[in-house]
């Protein structure tokens, strides 16, 4: 919670958010505003158990909690922390160290008289791989989208992708042998090919790195992206795919018929991680939430 002003603190209080406190100055601003209003606010305190990012060092938990507890209007409902490498199988010792550090921080808080009923540490990798990290609450992230915590991570859970990214065919062209496709002529047709120009490009979040290596679903079949991905178009080889024309649905991420392109598959082809895929697709596209 990066609160800097009394007005921001007031917005948190008005909406009854539960802020995560990671430094004493924020606690001061929130505590003072709560006291001025004569109200109380539940908060969580972030402990850095080894991530090296936001939070109070686990070794200074006692002094940090004392400073926050001095603000009688702030109710500390729990501690929170974040794993740095729970998705890396070679880092189990460090992850177990983070769990021990977090448990020690909770013990210190309870020795100081805090109930701490809602402590949380486990991210998606922690949920799957470290049962002893679940504590009172877990925080699934990538799992909510049916994705793996990292490209190399093999989850024992059967995950169902829930996010779809779709476009449509704008035009279908019959191209003779050795016709260059898209910018830079990085692809030439190999014999007579049917090329579909689709409505999506890197401006919509489709990674440019999928040029000549990505796939889409058209007519329930996986088809190759050919040539460079443009700002708002991408070309696809639909040779042999029946009934393709303007308006035909193109699935870049998700399922069509019996085939699926997952975020992990797309990320592997784009040489990135599925987190980046999901985030980039959400920048400017219209969204439809399906219950």
Image (cartoon, grey):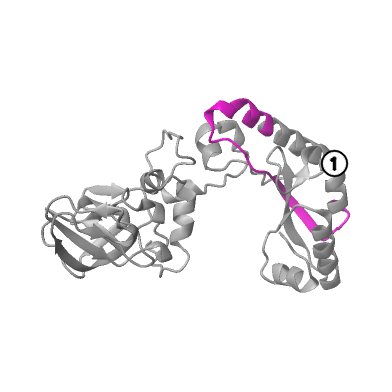
Where residue 160 appears, as percent x and y from the top left, is 36, 46
Query: Which residue is located at x 34 percent, y 53 percent?
Result: 211
Where residue 25 appears, as percent x and y from the top left, is 83, 58
Q: Is residue 141 magenta?
A: no
Q: Is residue 245 above or below residue 80?
A: below
Foreground: 1 or 242? 242
Q: Is residue 172 above or below residue 21?
A: below
Q: Is residue 34 left or right of residue 198?
A: right
Where residue 58 appears, as percent x and y from the top left, is 77, 39
Tell me if mark 1 has few (under 14), some (14-19) or many (20+) residues whose alpha carbon lies within 10 angstroms of its own: some
Query: Which residue is located at x 70 percent, y 71 percent?
Result: 11
Q: Is residue 202 left or right of residue 100?
A: left
Query: Which residue is located at x 19 percent, y 58 percent?
Result: 179
For residue 17, what is the image quadrant? bottom right
Q: Which residue is denoted by mark 1 in the rendering?
A: 62
Camera sees residue 130:
yes
Viewport quadrant of the C terminus: bottom left
For residue 57, what is the image quadrant? top right
Query: Which residue is located at x 78 percent, y 63 percent?
Result: 40
Foreground: 157 or 14? 157
Camera sees residue 216:
no
Where residue 271 appears, as percent x and y from the top left, is 43, 44
For residue 244, what is the image quadrant? bottom left
User: Which region of the structure is painted magenta?
Assistant: 69-98
Q: Is residue 89 magenta?
A: yes
Q: Is residue 89 above or below residue 145?
A: above
- Report helix, strand or loop for mark 1: helix
Viewport quadrant of the N terminus: bottom right
């Amino acid at each position: 919670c990066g609160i800097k002003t009394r007005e921001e603190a007031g917005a948190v209080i008005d909406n009854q958010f539960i802020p995560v406190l990671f430094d004493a100055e924020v606690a001061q601003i929130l505590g003072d505003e709560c006291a001025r209003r004569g109200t109380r606010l539940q908060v969580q305190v972030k402990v850095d158990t080894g991530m090296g990012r936001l939070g109070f060092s686990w070794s200074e938990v006692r002094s940090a909690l004392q400073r926050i507890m001095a603000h009688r209007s702030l109710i500390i409902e729990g501690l929170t922390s974040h794993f740095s490498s729970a998705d890396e199988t070679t880092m189990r010792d460090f992850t177990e160290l983070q769990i021990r550090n977090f448990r020690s921080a909770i013990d210190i808080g309870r020795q100081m008289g805090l109930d701490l009923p809602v402590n949380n540490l486990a991210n998606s990798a922690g949920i799957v791989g470290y049962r002893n990290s679940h504590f009172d609450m877990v925080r699934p992230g990538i799992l909510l989208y049916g994705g793996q915590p990292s490209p190399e991570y093999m989850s024992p859970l059967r995950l169902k992708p829930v996010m779809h990214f779709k476009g449509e065919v704008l035009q279908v062209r019959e191209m003779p042998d050795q016709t260059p496709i898209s910018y830079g002529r990085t692809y030439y047709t190999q014999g007579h090919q049917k090329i579909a120009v689709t409505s999506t490009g890197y401006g919509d979040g489709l990674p440019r790195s999928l040029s000549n290596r990505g796939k889409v679903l058209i007519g329930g079949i996986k088809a190759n992206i050919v040539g460079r991905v443009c700002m708002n178009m991408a070309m696809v080889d639909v040779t042999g795919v029946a009934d393709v024309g303007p308006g035909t649905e193109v699935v870049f991420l998700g399922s069509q018929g019996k085939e699926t392109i997952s975020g992990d598959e797309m990320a592997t082809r784009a040489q990135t991680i599925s987190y980046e895929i999901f985030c980039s697709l959400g920048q400017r596209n219209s969204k439809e939430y399906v219950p």
